[in-house]
Amino acid sequence: MKKFKCHCGAIEAEIKTSDNLEKILRCNCSLCKRKGAVMSMVKNENFKITKGLDKLRLYKFHTKVANHYFCSICGIYTHHNPRSNPAMTGFNLGCIDEIDTFNLKNILINDGLNHPLDKK
């Protein structure tokens, strides 16, 4: 179980995941390239907001399918549910104090700029 919090501490969560995160990624879509977060993913049932649900704000864009959440106080991106798999939660590894995102290896790049659901 990993403890998770935004910058100001208004939002906290618990994440059920192994110590060796299975997938570490960045995305090059228009939103992710601007926020610059390093993320990982778990099934929705393994991500639980324990504090500050009322402080979360939702942002949707483009197809309005993906849910992107951020803290309404400090503005930090906390997590999202991707449109390619809404049953998963992507979360900001920078919100876990024990993880130094600058020392992570094998970061995958998700090509959100050329998202397969945008192809006709």
Image (cartoon, helix red, strand yellow):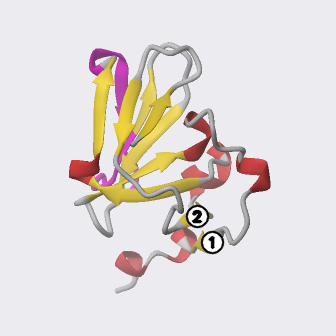
The residue type indicated by label 2 comes to Leu
Residue at x 45% of width, y 33% of height: 3
Q: Which residue is mark 1?
A: 109
- Label 2 secondary element: strand
Question: Residue 108 or 45: which is nearer the viewer?
Answer: 45
Res 65 → quadrant: bottom left
| Marks 2 and 1 close (CB-CB < 8 Å) | yes
Left or right, 3 with respect to 13, comes to right
Can residue 59 be seen from the camera position used here? Answer: no
Mark sitting on residue 24: none
Q: CA distance from mark 2 to mark 1?
A: 6 Å
**Location of residue 107 in the rendering, given as x and y in whole percent from the top left corner:** 66, 68
**Quadrant housing the N terminus:** top left
Residue at x 58% of width, y 56% of height: 30
**Location of residue 66 in the rendering, given as x and y in whole percent from the top left corner:** 33, 54
Q: Is residue 60 magenta?
A: yes
What is the crowding at mark 1: few (fewer than 14 residues within 10 Å), some, or many (at least 20)?
A: few
Can residue 56 be seen from the camera position used here? Answer: yes
Where 24 sits versus 99, above or below?
A: below
Q: Which residue is mark 2?
A: 25
- Look at the image and give the residue range highlighted in magenta: 53-68
**Quadrant housing the C terminus:** bottom left
The residue type indicated by label 1 comes to Ile
What is the crowding at mark 2: few (fewer than 14 residues within 10 Å), some, or many (at least 20)?
A: some
Left or right, 50 with respect to 109, comes to left
- Label 1 secondary element: strand
Residue at x 56% of width, y 70% of height: 113
Q: Is residue 79 magenta?
A: no
Name the residue furthest bottom.
120
Residue at x 36% of width, y 26% of height: 57
Res 88 → quadrant: bottom left
